Image (cartoon, rainbow, N blue to C red):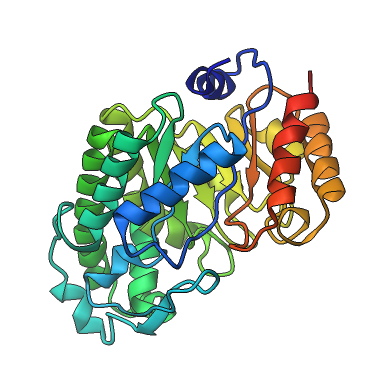
Amino acid sequence: MEKVKRVKAALQGEEVDRVPISVWMHYPSVDQDAKMLAKRQVLFQKKFDLDFIKLMPFGLYSAQDWGCQVKFFCDEIRSPVVAEHGIESEADWGELKPLSAEFGNWGQQLQLTQYMKEWGDSEVPFVQTIFSPLTTAYKLAGDRLFSDIKTEPKLVHHALEIITQTTKESVARNIEAGAAGIFFATQCATYDMLDDEMYQEFGIRYDLPVIKESNRQGGWFNILHIHGDRVMFSKLKDYPVQALNWHDRQVKPDLQRAREMTDKCLIGGLDEQGPISQGTSEEVTEQVVKTIREAKKQKLMIGPGCVAFPNTPEENIYAARLAVETSGR
């Protein structure tokens, strides 16, 4: 079964010859060069014969051009971190201006998509990583975002409108350039940060236009990634995406419970902090087999709940890939 057909069948709940699988991680030594990162991701997919690719731009790309200063380490393990936030006062929110999806860090990620389209296998779909507007605001301001929401909500709303405008343009250009959809990541849809009412106003209000833009542009493989503990799964499970991804091995709901809550395709089963990254190949195989048994074969893809460690043992990735080949038939 061709990979595009397998992925589409899994999304639609149709019969598959085997459960699709992918694994993703950061590449800090090359993620400042779109061409090098594309090459690395193409080679990674071919090496392990994975069914789809999640593009892996560095995690602060959406905030840097708005003034977030980033410290880079440029080695195989350590990802970039915030050196200085771009928002240092309430007034700074009002200074944000729209950015072009063709220049700076946004443009670099568009180049990544273009290189993937040129060099990748046309039968292997790939999705571009897009951060929710509130997540970008959080990367820009850090924890002060949540106090500013309370003291200067109008200014924060202004900034979120600007961020949403830029993000929508980026989504449209990436889909046009060949991405099958977006990996829409929200890091703020957790009760450790906000309550339902606040996320409705500052999260969902801006999340949905971005996702709908991908759908409007023809994106057929849109994944919602809900990052963190105590995630708002019930509140976000009906977003207009084709698949859901979260830390299913670490937080609630588990895959079995999620299967009862939604009919969307579920992507998970691999504990990114467990066997796949630092366990044995036997443990990885057992986890994959257990996932397919519990979550059933249809509307399921195997993947990590978040990024795997950059130094994940190759034998563990091979074990996961081989496990889907023989499990669930």
State the image coordinates of residue 106 (x, y, percent, origin top left). Answer: 24, 57
Question: Residue 41 location, x and y as percent?
Answer: 46, 47
Q: Is residue 147 left or right of residue 157?
A: right
Q: Number of numbered discs present? A: 0
The residue at the point 44 percent across, 54 percent down is: 56
Q: Residue visible at 62% across and 35% down? A: 21
- Figure check: 48 above or below 32: above
Q: Residue at (72%, 24%) from the top-left corner?
A: 297
Relative to 68, say whether 269 is above or below: above
Image quadrant in which you'd find residue 177: top left
Between 83 and 261, the residue placed more toward the observer is 83
Q: Position of residue 258 (x, y in %)?
A: 69, 38
> Residue 246, how many percent across, how many down?
60, 50
Please indicate whether residue 247 sits to the left or right of residue 67 in the image. right
The quadrant of the rendering that contains the N terminus is top right
Q: 278 or 273, which lies in front?
A: 278
> Would residue 237 be visible to someone looking at this image?
no
**Quadrant the C terminus occupies:** top right
Q: Determine if residue 250 is in view.
A: yes
Q: Residue at x 20, y 65 (%)?
A: 158
Relative placement, left or right, of 93 versus 124 is left
Left or right of residue 312, residue 97 in this image: left
